Image: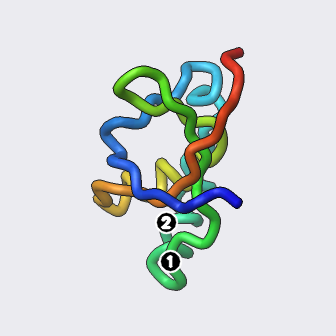
Amino acid sequence: MMKRETFAIANIYVPAKRRATLDPKKAQEIAESILQVGLQTPILVRQDGERFVLIEGLHRLEACKQLGEQTITGYLVQARRH
């Protein structure tokens, strides 16, 4: 069972390929949902030296950035590099 952790948003790197799939409208809708019910599904990241690389949860991460959050809940996973 994976353990939820809190990550500093500033330490999360979003690869260019993943960043290209960002839909600002979807991120805004998720931000509104987070305000109402909180973040329901944690993001997934992998360790890369001192930083973390986003695996899953681009729109949730962007929504938290829009809300001015400094941290986000997520799971640290073992994932291969693409």
Q: Residue placed at 56% from the left, 29% from the top? A: 19
Res 72 → quadrant = bottom left
With 35 as the anchor, is 82 left or right in this view?
Answer: right
* 52, above or below 27, in the image: above
Viewer-proximal residue among 49 and 13? 49
With 45 as the anchor, is 11 left or right in this view?
Answer: left
Q: What residue type is labelled 1?
A: Gly
Residue under label 2: 31
Number of other residues with Cα within 10 Å of mark 1, as a class: few under 14, some 14 to 19, many 20 or more? few
Viewer-proximal residue among 69 and 7? 7
Figure quadrant of the C terminus:
top right
Q: Residue placed at 54% from the left, 61% from the top? A: 4
Q: x%, y% of residue 48? A: 47, 23
Nearer to us: label 2 or label 1: 1
Compare marks 2 and 1 and give the one earlier in the sequence. 2
* 71, above or below 47, in the image: below
Residue under label 1: 38
